[in-house]
Image (tube, helix red, strand yellow):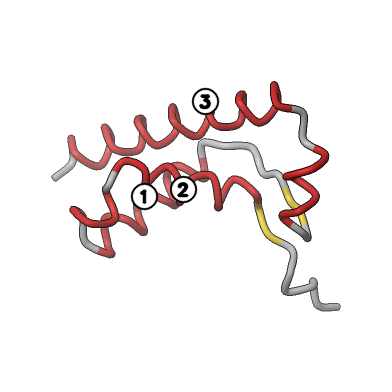
Amino acid sequence: MKLDDDIHNYYEKLTLDHIVELGLDANKDAEYLADLCCISLNLLPPRYIRYEVDMAFYLPQSERYEMQMKVREAVTRAREFLDSNE
């Protein structure tokens, strides 16, 4: 059995968006960014979707805000961990 290629964790998009928002994609190397993503995503619950349009139209604003706050906290914690182990 093969899972559909369209299935992905919505937190991946939110995490990458936040990393770009912080400008880390321009300041850190690929290894740091990969570690940052892995650590951050391991701190977050999975939220699997097939189509991003589903999240855009059916996710209540309050839940979207809560997810964004979770991402901010996870990325902050992951950065603190990585930066303390350099």
Does label 1 or label 3 sit earlier along the sequence?
1
Question: What residue is pinned by disc 3?
Answer: 69
Residue 8 in the image: above or below residue 64: below
Q: Amino acid at mark 1?
A: Val
Find the distance from the CA under tag 2 to the CA under tag 3. Answer: 13 Å
Residue 10, x across and y down, in percent:
65, 49
Contact (CB < 8 A) between labels 2 and 3? Answer: no
Looking at the rendered structure, the secondary structure element under dot 1 is helix
Residue 45 in the image: above or below residue 61: below
Residue 9, x across and y down, in percent:
65, 53
Residue 16, x across and y down, in percent:
45, 51
What residue sits 52% from the left and 43% below the top?
42
Outermost residue to the right: 1
What residue sits 67% from the left and 44% below the top?
46
Q: Amino acid at mark 3?
A: Met
Question: What residue is pinned by disc 1?
Answer: 20
Q: Quadrant of residue 67?
A: top right
Find the distance from the CA under tag 2 to the CA under tag 1. Answer: 5 Å
Q: Amino acid at mark 2?
A: Asp
Residue 68 in the image: above or below residue 5: above
Q: Quadrant of residue 44?
A: top right
What's the mark number on residue 49? Answer: none
Does label 2 or label 3 sit earlier along the sequence?
2
Question: What residue is pinned by disc 2?
Answer: 17
